[in-house]
Amino acid sequence: MMRLETQAEVCSSLKMWGHIPCGTASSLKKSANAHPTSSFLDSGISFGFAAEVFLCFSGTLTLELFVGTQKSFFGQSDLHILLSPWRRSRRCPKALGGMFRNVAAISLHLIGPLQRKKAGTSLTRCLHQTLTMATRLQARRLDGIDHNPWVECTKMASEYDAVNLGQGFPDFPPPDFALQAFQLALSSDFMLNQYTKAFGYPPLTKILASFFGKLLGQEIDPLKNVLVTVGAYGALFTAFQALVDEGDEVIIIEPFFDCYEPMTLMAGGHPVFVTLKPSPTQDGELDSASNWQLDPTELASKFTSRTKALILNTPNNPVGKVFSKAELELVANLCQQHDVICITDEVYQWLVYDGYQHTSIASLPGMWERTLTIGSAGKSFSATGWKVGWVLGPDSLVKHLRTVHQNSIYHCPTQGQAAVAQSFQHEQLHFGQPSSYFVQFPQAMQRCRDHMIRSLQSVGLKPVIPQGSYFFIADISDFKKKMPDLPGDKDEPYDRRFVKWMIKNKGLAAIPTSIFYSRPHQKHFDHYIRFCFVKDESTLQAMDEKLQKWKEELRP
């Protein structure tokens, strides 16, 4: 590495690779194609040209040259060129003088072949060749989000033949009327094998508008206020891509469904976290998801002039919290006060237990105009593989999601949409009655929940009783005290090590709850693991057999 401290040294030394015109702010005016650009970290200023690179100085410029040691694409060394700062400012400073107070730092990671270029060779051509050969395959928006703990847990569960209580899917069939609707879609109208309307199969958008319009107290236009997506996951991704811009802040309530953070980052946004905190419980008393509360002052402090959206998940995954009307009003007031969009993930809205009621935040005064409400046929009708989701909201928001949708997937499978349309028509006829699936299903799942809670308690796990959703978390603090040194990486959260230990030694698979937290907060919540109780009776029996063996091993 060599350091070149003056403008003259830099210009002289760079001649080995080609000519770089060097100048000052005064000479910038002579260059019509010079564009002021500010650094990503506001640490310096450079100027980019269509044809060449123009370096402007005020004070000291440092040039660092590194020679790679690994093989490059053309066989000699690892070739990278990093120009930092090199990002065009969205608004040019009024005074050029102020821009040169920072140090302009450029790091050129070059290789031998580039050094051997003859003087006079165009630097632009050299750099273009260098950049072309050094282009990495992975887009920078994927940095840090490639690891998926779900894959590891699922693979381990399969390898050790464990009872899978981790992943959130039913291992029983959808209701008969939904299966019949899908079979009809496959065999009746051959045109259901073809494209339908890009933004949703018309009978589906119509029934969604009618069904949810009554619940939300809105006249919903099937063409303007409804978008059918590839599952709720697709609705979330489309919403982030359509509405979150570079530098926008998105408030995420944690623990959160783990896609919210990477989707924010991929859109260029900045996630801002606010944590649900459990209230103390009496000794020997099981905790409840209703005890996990937002601190109103902390929540209010997260809103700034840069806040674009807040993501709400009720009933919540993984805790199973159903936000009360008072809590929703707190969120709604802050969103209106700061002109913030609310993206509400309500895929578990029908799965609410113990007499609790689900309220959609879009139904509150003043919230329809700023809310996107996301739902899922997979969660509604126990058919997660159908991958039919939707988003409801004002045209002022949904129109931007349609733009993303039409320029990405464009269209969702027609037959699945037809089956979901028929299923909702069935539910609309039975809604609120004992014959309604949306009444029967949560009753059945509450029995499964209670079964699993009792069983897990027998070996010392302490479930947090959920108000809704597929899931609950269980406290493993006692195990952390008794066996703190489980195998695993030094910095690996305890719950991840415990889940691996439980899969290998007890034949039961769960999901570590720390993955639902931002990195700084993972260590504070690594004494919980998540279970899915939406399982068939045979799965619960297999769980009981594993737990019985575990219980016997605990006897002195």
Image (spheres, grey):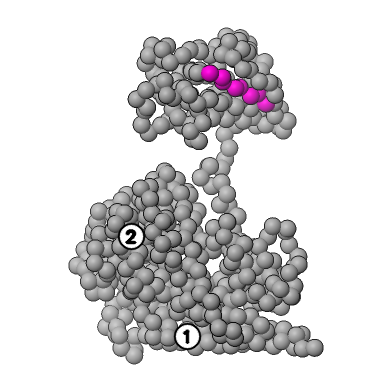
- Taking the spot 49% from the left edge, 55% from the top edge, the residue there is 261
Numbered range of the magenta stretch = 59-66
Q: Would residue 160 be counted in the magenta stretch?
A: no
**Contact check, label 2 and label 1, Cβ < 8 Å:** no
Tag 2: amino acid: Leu
Which of marks 1 and 2 precedes in the sequence?
Answer: 2
On the image, the x and y values in percent for residue 400 come to 31, 51
Question: Circle 1 — which element?
Answer: helix
Return the residue at label 1.
Answer: 446
Return the residue at label 2.
Answer: 334
| Labelled disc at residue 157 | none
Closer to us: 4 or 447: 4
Closer to us: 236 or 492: 492
Q: What secondary structure is the stretch in magenta mostly built from? A: strand
**Label 1 packing within 10 angstroms: few (<14), some (14-19), many (20+):** many
Q: Is residue 140 visible?
A: yes
Say which quadrant the N terminus sits in: top right
Horizontal side of 384 relative to 18 (left or right) equals: left
Cα–Cα gap, marks 2 and 1: 34 Å
Horizontal side of 539 relative to 554 (left or right) equals: left
- Taking the spot 55% from the left edge, 11% from the top edge, the residue there is 19
Horizontal side of 555 relative to 101 (left or right) equals: right
Closer to us: 427 or 362: 362
Quarter of the image for residue 123 reads top right
Q: Would residue 64 be counted in the magenta stretch?
A: yes
**Label 2 packing within 10 angstroms: few (<14), some (14-19), many (20+):** some
- Taking the spot 34% from the left edge, 89% from the top edge, the residue there is 435
On the image, the x and y values in percent for residue 393 come to 28, 61
Tag 1: amino acid: Gln
